[in-house]
Image (cartoon, rainbow, N blue to C red):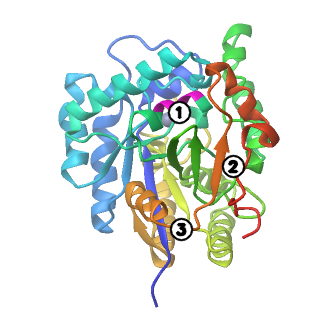
Amino acid sequence: MLKPIASLSCDLDDKWTYMKSYGLALGTPLPSYLGAIVPRLLDFLKKRDLTITVFIVGQDAALDHNMEVLRSISDMGHEIGNHSFHHDPWLHLYSDTQIEREIAEADEHIERATGQKPVGFRGPGYSVSIATLRMLARRGYLYDATTLPTFLNPLARAYFLMTAKLGGEESRRREGLFGSFTDGFRPVKPYQWRLDDLKLIEIPVTTMPIVKLPFHVSYILYLAGFSRALALQYFRMALDLCRLTGTEPSLLLHPLDFLGCEDVQDLSFFPGMKLPFQKKIEVVAEVIDLFCQAFTVLTMREHAHRQANRADLPVIELAPSTGSSDAKIFDSPAVGMRASSDTRFERR
Ligand SMILES: [Zn+2]
């Protein structure tokens, strides 16, 4: 029987990106674990004959000492995506000019380091705005992969702010981190944004259909910290729900999924970072093997191409351009996500 398709990606967040989100001092050179994690990731994928999408941060691609390790990802045939230049999770607060610089500079350095020109973008911290989507479409991007449709976003943010212990201004910048409650109303299945006369495919980070609970690998590892059996049962349920609802899932990996508490001591405050590497990798292997048994796993670019060729792809029309301040409109699903008459995501 022909298996349904799915996609797999990894946000190559380096150590400094986590420290930056938590408002910690970075110093120079930027704290990094890329040299340790990338070979582990590539080896893991090679053993399973998997080709995925790796979203790279422009700042990492701009550093000469990262060239070799980043090129090795591309050399193995993986797709390279753009994960912004500075990995600022408050990208949605930026002006059009700042957003363009973030995307353009990352594009330039990523292409120089990996030889690939990205056609896919994932904003840091699931931060998305109309201004960013428009800029991507204008620059000829095929897809965006930033949205995380879940109702748990405010809870994730509350947990983050509680553990990060940041001051007033720093906390305010992170108000949009992980998105808002209304993100839960966004579709789980892929769709197309139409912005003025521009088009862009959206491949959401898939959450459990109907209940919209996250099931990316880091979340499963977090649950495995309580009970491994329950975490795997939860993941199986998510895959079953995807199959039942005809959802082609896009699953997300993070570098921390390949690092144990013995590898990085100073990120122990992060969910799932109290487990040793061996314990984590066993869960990651089981999760990915289950995923591959149920679906034919593609890169996100291939996943997006398949969507682009679908005649029945749902369409969401965004309000005409009014400058970057329209990021706010986007927060209201009733106004910002005005669906065109051929939108079918709610009825399917
Ligand atoms: Zn990231």
Please report whichever mark, 2 or 3, sits nearer to the chain's N-terminal start: 2
Residue 268 visible somewhere in the drawing: no
Mark 3 vs mark 1, foreground winner is 3
Mark 2 vs mark 1, foreground winner is 1
Please report whichever mark, 3 or 1, sits nearer to the chain's N-terminal start: 1
Q: Quadrant of the C terminus?
A: bottom right
Q: Residue furthest front?
A: 197
Task: Answer whether labels 3 and 1 touch (C-beta < 8 Å).
Answer: no
Q: CA distance from mark 2 to mark 1?
A: 20 Å
Amino acid bearing label 2: Pro
In this rendered view, identify the residue nearer to me: 135 or 90.
135
In this rendered view, identify the residue nearer to me: 85 or 24.
85
Report helix, strand or loop for mark 2: loop
Task: Return the residue at label 2.
Answer: 149
Residue at x-position 69% and y-position 35%: 179
Which portion, as a residue range, is magenta?
Answer: 131-135
Assess disc 1: are there few (<14), some (14-19) or many (≥20) residues with their C-alpha within 10 Å of its C-alpha: many
Is residue 69 covered in magenta? Answer: no
Amino acid bearing label 3: Ala
Is 227 on the left or on the right of 263, as rendered?
right
Q: Which mark is residue 197?
A: none
In this rendered view, identify the residue nearer to me: 43 or 110.
110
Q: CA distance from mark 3 to mark 1?
A: 23 Å
Task: Return the residue at label 1.
Answer: 134
